[in-house]
Amino acid sequence: MCKLIVNAGPYAFEARLEREAAPKTCAAFEAVMPYESQIVHVRWSGEGVWIPLGDHDFGVEYENHTSHPAPGHIILYPGGISETEILLAYGGVDFSSKMGQLAGNHFITLTSGQENLMELGNLVLWKGAQPIQFAYA
């Protein structure tokens, strides 16, 4: 199991890569680690925050994909009918865009700090973009 630290806003979460279920997505993401960006609140999907990535191509297709990630699941939408993105669910999510329902590859699961997810989501919703960093533990 590969352990990660995900720092988002003022919160730190331990996490694991889902290498068995999404090996190609994990390998593509590991190639850009450590990874830093900003999260903003989702527009259509419910209780989630996302990293919009435009036309960035990770070179992966669907694997371990879902439209309903659980709180603490991180998914990568590889692009297609909407822009490439990474989404972190902090509550109920029905992963969608203005084009309709999407599915993303569940490739990271938070393993600690879930009690802070709702606070993180509300912080992003009401106060705006927050920094996020993914690094090996």
Image (spheres, rainbow, N blue to C red):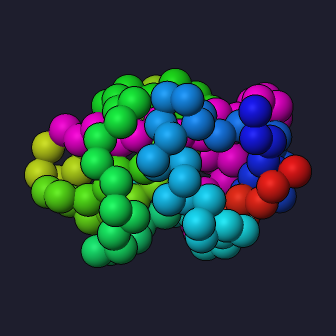
Residue 136 falls left or right of residue 72: right
Residue 25 higher or lower than 39, as above or below: above
Residue 63, compared with residue 131, is above or below; it is above
Residue 9 at x, y = what percent?
75, 60
Q: Is residue 37 visible?
A: yes
- Locate residue 3: give its quadrant: top right
Q: Would residue 7 be seen by someone viewing this image from the given angle?
A: no
Residue at position x 60%, y 70% in the image: 32
Residue 86 % position (x, y): 46, 55
Q: Where does residue 7 sit, x and y in percent of width and height?
A: 78, 57
Q: Position of residue 129 (x, y in %)?
A: 59, 68
Residue 54 or residue 92, whichever sits in front: 54
Can you say whether 102 is above or below 65 in the image?
A: below
Left or right: residue 122 versus residue 70 is right
Count the labels in the image: 0
Left/right placement of residue 20 relative to residue 94 reads right
Outermost residue, right side: 137
8 lies above or below 71: below
Q: Residue at x 87, y 51 (%)?
A: 137
Can residue 82 be found in the magenta stretch? no
- The magenta region covers 101-130
Residue 126 lies in the magenta stretch: yes
Q: Residue at x 19, y 38 (%)?
A: 101
Q: Quadrant of the N terminus?
A: top right
* Near-viewer residue (117 or 122): 117
Describe residue 95's horizontal placement relative to residue 126 as left or right.
left
Along the line of sight, which residue is nearer the eye, 45 or 6?
6
Seen at 55% across and 29% down, the residue is 20
